[in-house]
Image (cartoon, helix red, strand yellow):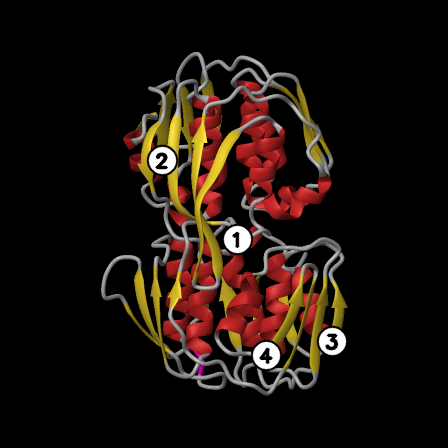
Amino acid sequence: MSAGQAWVAAPGAPLRGRLRVPGDKSVSHRAVMLGALAQGVTRVTGFLEGEDTRATARVFERLGVRIETPSASERIVHGVGLHGLRASAQALDCGNAGTGMRLLAGVLAGQGFDSVLIGDESLSKRPMRRVTEPLAAMGARIDSEPGGLPPLRIHGGRGLHGIDYTLPVASAQVKSALLLAGLYAQGETVVREPHPTRDYTERMLSAFGWPIEFSPGYARLSGGHALRATDVAVPADFSSAAFFLVAASVVPGSELLLEAVGMNPRRTGLLAALRLMGADIAEEHAREEGGEPVADLRVRYAPLHGIEVPEALVPDMIDEFPALFVAAACAQGRSRISGAAELRVKESDRIATMAQGLRIIGAQIEETPDGAIIDGGALRGGSVDSHGDHRIAMSFAVAAQRARDEVRIGDVENVATSFPGFDRLARDCGFELRTAFGL
C-alpha cells in the first residue's frame, strides 16, 4: 500500500439525493484552448476546477494569454488569435493531463517558436508516439525520450501541410491534435477513425466559427481561417457521473438524480452497457447547452446481470471501464470485456490494476490482453492500491459500498485531477468514505 493520502470506504446507506458533478474535463480543456486561439473574449462557465484543466490554463498563460477567474468554475479568456501566442522561456508543465499534452502538441507544432512539454511522473510514462508520428507526417518536428515518452521538444517554424490520415487506433486525443495542427497547415487535413470517438473538438471548432465537416469517424478542415470568440457552457462530466450511475445501480434502495450531464453520443457507451446489464437509468429534461446535448439522469437500484460488452461501445466508454469493472463484479453471472487494449496505457495499466484490486476484495476476474472476464459475486474488504490513478480510486470507493467489510484505497491524491470534491459529494448522497493517511 502506498504512503500518503488514502480513503477508507465501507457499505453506507442507500444512495439518495440530487447532485451535480463537476464540469466536463474534455470540454473544459478545449474551451480554454480555442478561446486562447480565438479573436475576442470567451467566457467559460461550468469550467472544471481540476488540476488537469488548471494546468492547461496555466500553459496558455505562459504562452501570453490573459485568463481571468472571476469566480469558481468560470474563466474569461482573452484570445490572442491563431498567431498571437508567445514563446515561453520555461518548459510547459501539463501535470497529469494526457489530453492537455496531446492537444497542445498539435497547437504548438504550428507555431513559429520552439516549445517543451513536460508532465508529472505518471504522464511521463505515457506514450506519445501515436500523436507525434502523424504530426511529423504533417511536417512537424517533435523530439521525445526513448519509446516516444515525454518530455516533448517541439520545433517551431516548420510550415505544416495537411494530410489524409487514418488512425490505426481510435483516439479522440490524437484526432484532436491533428485537427488543431490542421488549423495552421496548408491545404486540407482529413482524419478517419476505425471507430467513431468523441467529437468535442469538431463541435467546438464549429461553434468558434471554423469551417469543418464531420460525421462519426470522419473530420475534414482546411487552414487559413480564423476562430471567433464565443461563450461556452460546460456540461457536467459524464465520466464523473459514471461512478454515481454505477453506485446507485448496485446499492439496494438507491435513487439519485444527476443534473445536466453531458450526453455526447461519443461519451455515453457506459450508459448503453449498464442498460444492457439491466440498469434502471432514465433521461429527463433533455436539452442542448453550448452545442452539446445535456440531460438529467435518474438512476434507481436494479439487479444487474453479466453481459458480453459489445466492442462497438468500447471507444465511447474508454474512460469509464474501471467503473464498468465494478458493475460487472457486482452483477449476477459472467461479463466479458474485449477490444480495450488502450486501457493498458492510461494513467495506470487499468486492466491490471483493476484486476489486482478486485481480486483482493474477493472478485473473480481473469485478465486478457485487451480486457477481462469477470464473474460477479460477493465482495469482501481489503487494502487496494490505486497506483495514483484517479478513476481507479473512485471505482474502488464505489465497490466498497457493496463490500462486506472496509476497503482501504491507497494513493488517492490524483482524484483532484478530474473530480475535486468527489469524497464530499459521495458522503452527501450516502457513501461511507473517510480520508486517512499512510495506509
Distance from label 2 to label 3 (Cα)? Answer: 47 Å
Q: Is residue 81 above or below residue 36?
A: below
**Which labelled disc corresponds to residue 155?**
none
- The three-letter code of the residue at mark 4 reads Pro
Q: Earlier in the sequence, mark 4 or mark 2?
A: 2
> In terms of sequence position, does the residue under pointer 2 or pointer 3 come before the other?
2
Give the secondary structure at mark 4. Answer: loop
* Residue 278 is at least partly visible in this image: yes
Q: Amino acid at mark 1?
A: Leu
Please identify the residue farthest to the front as the structure is shown.
285
Residue that badge 3 annotates: 163
Tell me the residue that label 2 is attached to.
4
- Residue under label 4: 211
Amino acid beneath label 3:
Ile
Sequence-earlier tag: 3 or 1: 1
Q: Position of residue 430 (x, y in %)?
A: 32, 26
Nearest-to-viewer mark from 3 and 1:
3
Quarter holding residue 39: bottom left
Asked whether disc 2 touches disc 3, contact meaning CB atoms under 8 Å apart, the reply is no
Main secondary structure of the magenta stretch: loop
